[in-house]
Amino acid sequence: MSASHGHAGRPPENPLPGAAAALDRAVSRGLAAVTGGALGRYQSAVVRIGMASTWLLFLLREFPHRDQLYGPGSAWGPDLAKSLIAGNHAFTVLLWNDGRGWFELCYALAVAASATLLLGWRTRTSALMFMIGVLSLQNRSVFMGDGGDNVVHIMAIYLAFTRCGQVWSLDSRRARRRAEASAAAADPADLAAPADPAHASGAAVAEPADPVGIALWVVLGGALVAATLAGRLSTGWGLVFWGCLAGQLLWWAVRRYAPGEPRTVMDIMGNVVHNGAMLVLAAEVCLVYSTAGWYKIQGSRWQDGTALYYPLHLDDFTPWPALSHALAGNGVLVMIISYGTVIVQVAFPFTLFNRRVKNVLLVGMMLEHASIAVVLGLPFFSLAMIAADAVFLPTGFLLWLGWRLTSRPGRGAEARARSPGCRGRARPATGQPGPSLGLGRSSTPFPARPGTPPSTRRTARRRPARHPPDLRASAASAEVSGHGARSAPAPRPLRTLLRAGAVPRRRAP
């Protein structure tokens, strides 16, 4: 009885030992990932470049017809536009004034905002002005757009909440040069001295003044004050724009005068907003494809595999009549493309859990939109969809692509040398292996040891690397657009350097 009473007094054992600890670790890792940095920096940069270039090319192509599309000479007159805006409460600055000069100014600012966002110059300001330009023009004449305009419309709003200028932008180059100048101007004695406890606790050096950025936001703030006093803004849009101005003012003040813990808190908040916007952007792309696929399934023409046949015979969608008629004349190809389109669109959201299958379908969808641009004559719709699809591109591929596009033509030839033991194969110089996508083992050989006969030299294979060495360094460097420098990468172990050939091996005497 005593034993039974003692056993009854013990607390019940956990039926799932370690489950709570595993869940706690998973939650901690998730919070650290969301708050520790901006996720998808390269993907957001590609979306920024793609959307800005799509809208810029559209505005330049329609420049001769801008008055008939969005100006005072549009068939959708100002009275009709104002009556529609009064019902749906959409935002547009074109209806603030019916004059031709105001329209030309707004159109020019939309072109300038697209160009600056494409280049990544003052990305935070450019993203906000890009959103204003897109919403103003499209909401002025809502019946002039197509599916591509809707995609640009939605993505322009999401880009305003992302840190899309941390890489591949003029902002990142300016921040990198500023960091290099600060490092070069630093006193070597200070670098060799032990770290100050105040700096070790997270304090940072206040950043220098930014007169160009201050001038931009002063002008925008003055325009916002004038629009508010004139009663041009609704309550909702007024809160949005005043919130953006207050947030920018607070961010500048913290960076300039409180670079310690307040700066860290503001950076965490920026990371959370950016990561949330990227999540919504990815969910939006999945929603577009899933709804398009499921609606196609309900159509009888998609069910019998003849849906592609009909648009190929419409004059508005046949820029190349011979090509369209040749494609429509092949019934088997029409059926395969029709069924394949439905399958890819319905299956894509479910393949996000498998990276390889997702990449295959992603390539298929991009090729499909490229075909739509050529066959059906919808280039801007295709460009917008390809730019939206880029949010799912692998980071390794984007790093490799950026390395290939930015490398000089003669740079690789100067670094490579011929080795007798490689049988004529060009090999990189010591410590400079070629780029790898991380898809498998690289066939780049190691430099042979000095004095080894060519017949007895062995070609070793190095371990697969996710990115080239120079890309690993650039990905971890302080490429930020005024959002705070990232910590330097940890030094690689000596064993890794020896394996990569960056440190010569010492031979025994």
Image: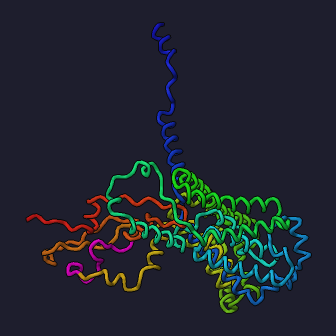
Q: Is residue 426 magenta?
A: yes
The residue furthest top is: 1
The image quadrant that residue 352 belongs to is bottom right
Q: Position of residue 235 (x, y in %)?
A: 82, 59
Quarter of the image containing the C terminus? bottom left
* Side (left or right) of 388 relative to 92: left
Residue 365 visible at all = no
* Side (left or right) of 406 relative to 324: left
User: Viewer-proximal residue, 75 or 283?
Assistant: 75
423 above or below 48?
below
The residue furthest left is: 509
319 above or below 212?
below
Residue at position x 89%, y 72% in the image? 82
Q: Main secondary structure of the magenta part?
A: loop
Q: Position of residue 261 (x, y in %)?
A: 53, 50
The part of the chain drawn in magenta is 419-438
Residue at position x 76%, y 88% in the image? 315
Residue at position x 26%, y 73% in the image? 430
Residue 461 visible at all = yes
Number of labels in the image equals 0
Q: Position of residue 186 (x, y in %)?
A: 38, 64
The image quadrant that residue 147 belongs to is bottom right
Residue at position x 91%, y 70% in the image? 83
The residue furthest bottom is: 322
